[in-house]
Amino acid sequence: MVFVYAVLGLLILLLAGDALVKGAVNLALRVGIPALIVSLTIVAFGTSAPELLISVQAALEGVPGIALGNVVGSNTANVLLVLGVPALITVMHTSQCETRKSYLVMLAGSVLFIGLAFRGVFDWIAGLILLAVLALALGDSVREALAHRRAGKPDPEVEEPEGADPDMPWWKILLFLALGLVGLPLGADLLVDSASEIALMFGVPDTVIGLTLVALGTSLPELATTVMAAIRRQADVAIGNVIGSNMFNLLAIIGVASLIAPMPVDPNLLRFDLWVMLGASILLVPFVFLRRDLTRIWGVVLSALYVGYVLLVLT
């Protein structure tokens, strides 16, 4: 039953996160917040809500391995699996994408995260540093996007808000918000408790479950989005989705969770998993800077690397 509860918790989290995004986006648009700001902030935070609630819940319950493992494992899965699987289906023409600046921010965030991890704990100091960097990155994105708009040019890295419906009635907006706000903590509680029990059952550290089961589960929405983007020949959406998700995982999720409860860092993360995460991020260099397309061969390589990584972690 513990696996059933884990799947149920994950399902509730994903559905509640989607409801919260729809409700928050349409509420913000209704009260006059510009669509550009909504897209860069509310949508970005909303789509990371399941991971955020998992990390906060895990920190409060004294299982920081699940919180940190979820983020590190998700970032690794986002590059190797979320880009690898769609590339198996069809060639993604990433050579036509312009994501250099956001990629560099993500890479800098990864290096900063690893540096803070070597302090041995993610506490309120680390949390404030991560959130300050996130605020600077978002502020720069808003400034640049507004400059593009004033010049009459759309910003290639900013999409229209997901789930926006100008005709959505107020009762529906409030219903979506209520479902999201109730469902997220409920799903997080179920998933964290189940993950802890699974770790005890198999005699493995909480970090291992966070790096594999929880991380894979929370990466499923990104995988679904990227597969659909690949099928529609929207490579910019696919790679932009991965870069944005990884940046928010490191800066926002661990930043907020660190303010709520200190999270000691598992030595195994320092020895192995953080470097795998950084290595996976560096693998994007040919597609971001050298104008290479994500071909099926790359899809095989990335997917095989992820399978190999998971097997290494589990053994």
Image (cartoon, grey):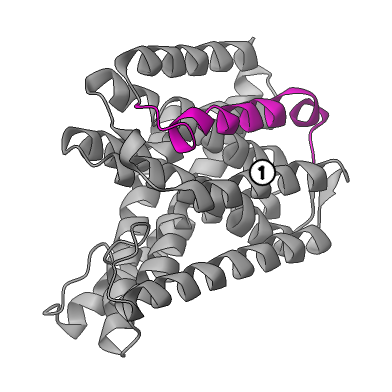
x then y, percent, for residue 140: 55, 70
Q: Secondary structure at mark 1?
A: helix
Q: Quadrant of residue 32?
A: bottom left
Query: Looking at the picture, which amino acid does disc 1 mark?
Result: Ser
Name the magenta segment's main secondary structure. Answer: helix
Q: Residue 133 vs residue 41: left or right?
A: right
Q: Is residue 307 above or below residue 1?
A: above
Front residue of 13 and 290: 290
Q: Mark 1 — residue?
A: 110
Q: What residue appears at the point 35 percent right and 62 percent down from the top-left corner?
A: 158
Quarter of the image for the N terminus: give it: top left
Task: Farthest residue to the right: give it.
Answer: 119
Q: Locate residue 96, reporting x and y percent.
A: 31, 40
Q: Residue at x 49, y 37 (%)?
A: 289
Q: Quadrant of residue 76?
A: top right
Picture layout, residue 143 above or below residue 245 = below
Give the residues in magenta.
264-293
State which quarter of the image contains the C terminus. top right
